[in-house]
Image: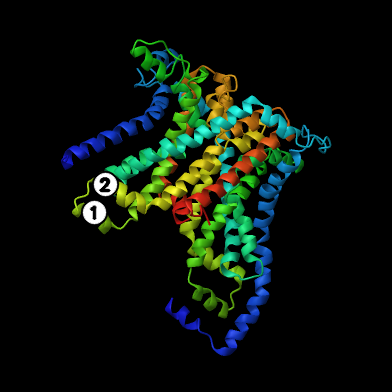
Amino acid sequence: MKSITTRNTLRVIILIVVASVVIGPLLAAFFGGFKGNSELRTNPLWLPDSWAADNYIGILLDGNFWRYLGNSFFISLMTVFLTLVVGAAAAYVFSQIRFFGAKMILSYLLLGLMFPFAAAILPLFIKVRDLGLLDTYWAVILPQTAFGLSLAILLFKAFFDQLPKELFEAAYVDGCSYLRFFWSFTLPLSTPILATVGVFVFVQSWNNFLLPLVVLNDRSIYTWPLGMMQFQGEYLTQWNMILAFVTLTIIPAVIFFLAAQKYIVAGLTGGSVKG
Amino acid sequence: MTTLDRTAVPRRGNADRVKKGLVSGKFTALLILLPPALILFSLFVILPLADAVYYSGFSWNGYGAPSDFVGSQNYQRLLDHSVFHTALWNTAKLILVSLLIQMPLALGLALLVYRKTPTNTLFRLVFFLPYILAEVAAGLIWSFVFDGDYGITSSLLHAMGQESVYVLADHQWAFPAIMTVIVWKYFGFHMMIYIAALQSVPKDLVEAAKLEGAKPRQVALFVQIPLIKHAIVVSGFFAIIGSLQIFDIIIPMTNGGPSNSTHTIVTYLYSFGLSRLNIGFGSAAAVVLFVLAIGIAFFYQRTTGKGSKA
């Protein structure tokens, strides 16, 4: 039987090896952004000779970079807002109000959990085009919201079901309607789940590629993943520029992740483990 | 709270009033709160999926109304297309890699870091990091790693005295490279699911097994893993449904190449349906994807005996 210390050393070695494989490419990208292209060729992995930030500064001074980020930010924010309001409203109905057909309608809305988004992408393109929404923010916001609703409703309903029923009865005697109760009691009491779903929806929207790729053609409204692919197309083999661009888009994601990791992890695992 | 609870048992008159008022308020609430979700969901989820079935019967470039009905011809063409076979097989490979390599790896690591200590928390964060990165960004970084002129793999090969390989332009290596990136990107997600489950396993069970003289490996195999079976089933479901939809990572890495050898179902329906405006043909591929997803979901529920969701 191995002693506890050897076992633990082995464990830490395994963890460090895996961690280096995970972090290695990200660090290489970060370092690569400081290098010249010829230096990159001989030294793709390790620290740069000098920390010349020209590549980074060039991108940061380019208005397009900020426009891409701004577009993504607006789209993500609106998607979160709509998903929370529309999803919570529907979940509240299923949680608080008994009516004929409630179960069927709920199952209908939860169907989205099984549907692969990509299967709808061609008709979505047609629909968005026929509605005259191509090259608008709504072309991304509305379908994203619709596809996020199922999970949002599932999680919201589970949370609302746990709120004390007595609260509503008491509020109603004091003349409070369903709508007001939803607005002034249910929503404020549900900030943990609103934050969880909100953060999760935000990350999904921020990273979305397929939908914007299909419905946005005008460069001025590109989201950042599209802008990044555009940039890559322009600089093709200038890997140092591309790596600088990628790094700059990753940094906000990493900061956001560290700040909101509690909610991100809860959103991902909470929804699945409870099942 | 207590005062509220007290008023919650109203006198008789109050109770009637509550009942009556609730019925009328109910419909207003229903009419305001439910329709937005129903309309959005129907318009942008259900209707497009139904449209896909409809369009798949036509030869249609997306302009005007579809009028050239071709029956099952699109499906026939799809089944005869060797690139589609490759796409199906590649998608199957992604599912297999996710189930047979990614999930065991995630489970093993979860067992190593599930206890709440500061170092474990740090490792968990690191392992989970790739999951929150955008697929496109991950794909671009890895296409640098695999680049034949600049990449890390080629400089490693040089160091070993070998010729550099253009991994992503190579028939034999391009798809294994993609599978590597997929494992790299998603294992942290599965690990987090297992960690949440492992932390809810009662400590005394693990302690008892240890007192009986069970080695850590035996505790994991015979106590912990059986107790988190539900989490494993759920993560397997996510792995399959996720693998069916892989798209973003492929585009920056190979864009389906070399010579169409790295397509998945979704990149296939994008390249051969949307890019070429063969809406009918692409829709047929979408329907196949849809049927596969639903079919696998049902089959999976049956065989694992436990619902995936809801």
Colour convention of the picture:
rainbow
Residue A185 lies, in percent from the top left, at 52, 68
**Which residue is rendered at x = 63% and y = 25% of the image?**
B82
Residue at image position (60%, 61%) is A89
Q: Give, as a three-letter code, the residue at label 1.
A: Ala
Residue sticking out furthest to the front: B303
Q: Which mark is residue B230?
A: none
Write down the chain letter for disc 2.
B
| Circle 1/circle 2 CB separation < 8 Å | yes
Is residue A264 in view from this perspective? no
Q: Residue at x 45, y 14 (%)?
A: B165
Q: Amino acid at mark 2?
A: Gln
Q: Which element is circle 2 on?
A: helix
Q: Nearer the viewer, residue B105 or A233?
A: B105
Residue B250 in the image: state x and y as whole percent.
54, 29
Mark 1–mark 2 distance (CA, rounded to whole Å): 9 Å
Q: Name which quarter of the figure residue B287 lies in.
A: top right
| Pointer 2 residue | B218
Q: Pointer 1: what residue? A: B209
